Image: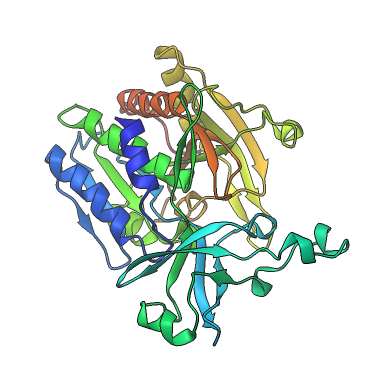
Amino acid sequence: MIRDTLAELMLIPGLSGHEDRVASAIAAHLDRMGLPHRSDRLGNLMATIPGDPALPSVMVFTHMDQLGFIVRKIETSGLIRLERLGGVPERALPAQAVVLCTAQGDLPGVIANKSHHATTPEEKYKVLPYGELYVDAGFASADAARAAGVKIGTPVTYLPRVLPLQGTRLAGTSVDDRAGCAVLLALAAARRGRPGPTLHLVWSVQEEYNLRGVLPAATAMQPDIALQIDLLLACDTPDMASRGEVTLGGGPGISLYSFHGRGTLNGVIPHPSLVKLAEEAAEKGSLPLQRSAHTGALTDLSYIQFMGPEGVACLDVGFPMRYSHSALEVVDLADLDGLARLLDLMLDGISPALRLTRSP
């Protein structure tokens, strides 16, 4: 189920603030499950499975959006300039295929890369700022581009692709975080009609933009516990070997520390009771449990932890992924299956004895 759902969602463009098509696809899955759902003014998609009121309520969430671009200017020549939206790696942009999402339909284009035969030796090793790049979608004039539906503010994403690799591995666009969306759907299917805590499921918006799109949903639900599904940086390639011990195919994991120091002084130090809950669930299910600690990464869980009069007990739970924010990210489907199983066991392990207060 996760493989097919993930492939379906990866092929749907959904730039931050423009997640409607992704939300509609996820809502269709919920409809087939018979699970009622709703959305808020920002576009967060929410569903609740009622449970035992004596147990702490739980919100499990993941984001639907992806990073990309917004059309900034249409040149008289028909070439298109972009504004970056989210953490797009500029060094990986030239020659990338993109899609312009207009009201008249999706239009393919390519981010131009200067002809090699005209590139000077100095230019060969220079990374161009995104402001100097442009998209060639085949238009011969600005009027032609506008007639096709391109205008200032048109969303642009990497061209959606799914590339099956060897074994259970998959490459493609927006694995971050359509993989989380697929896992959350699998969890929803597994928890229907099961005893346990009240479970709020949220597919959130605008994580790649400002990390706060989920806040209205969390405010409405007032959870005692929040579990965020997102990537863990895989550290099993030569360029990442010094960053940690998380390996692709090594199973699901938890984050023990995250911090973002590049203009956003925030992160998550997880609640110890939830760390223990994850460890015990993994042991019960004979699942591997990888551990991550990173500076430079951040999720919107960072803001949920401060909500309400007592705060929210928080834990980032995730899957290993290679090549984050590039046009082709890589994931192992076995890790996603393990993550869905881990979350299910964690919910089974929540009892009235779970201590969330931190007083002595």
User: Is 275 rendered above or below residue 49?
Assistant: above
Residue 244 visible somewhere in the drawing:
yes
What is the image's colouring?
rainbow
Residue 211 visible somewhere in the drawing:
no
Q: Please tell me which residue is depicted at 50% across the width and 80% down the height of the picture.
A: 140
Q: Position of residue 333 (x, y in %)?
A: 44, 28
Left or right of 277 on screen, residue 35: left
Q: Please tell me which residue is depicted at 46% across the width and 66% down the height of the picture.
A: 156
Location of residue 41 by image quarter? bottom left
Q: Please tell me which residue is depicted at 36% across the width and 82% down the height of the picture.
A: 147
Q: Please tell me which residue is depicted at 46% across the width and 57% down the height of the picture.
A: 207
Q: Nearer the viewer, residue 55 or 216?
A: 216
In the rendered view of the protein, which quadrant contains the N terminus? top left
Q: Nearer the viewer, residue 345 or 158?
A: 158
Q: Residue furthest front?
A: 117
Left or right of 82 on screen, residue 123: right
Q: How many marks?
A: 0
Q: Residue furthest right?
A: 121
User: Is 82 rendered above or below residue 110?
Assistant: below
Q: Nearer the viewer, residue 249 or 82?
A: 82
Q: Position of residue 327 (x, y in %)?
A: 55, 50
Q: Nearer the viewer, residue 280 or 242?
A: 242
Q: Position of residue 98 (x, y in %)?
A: 50, 60
Q: Position of residue 232 (x, y in %)?
A: 56, 37
Left or right of 231 on screen, residue 126: right
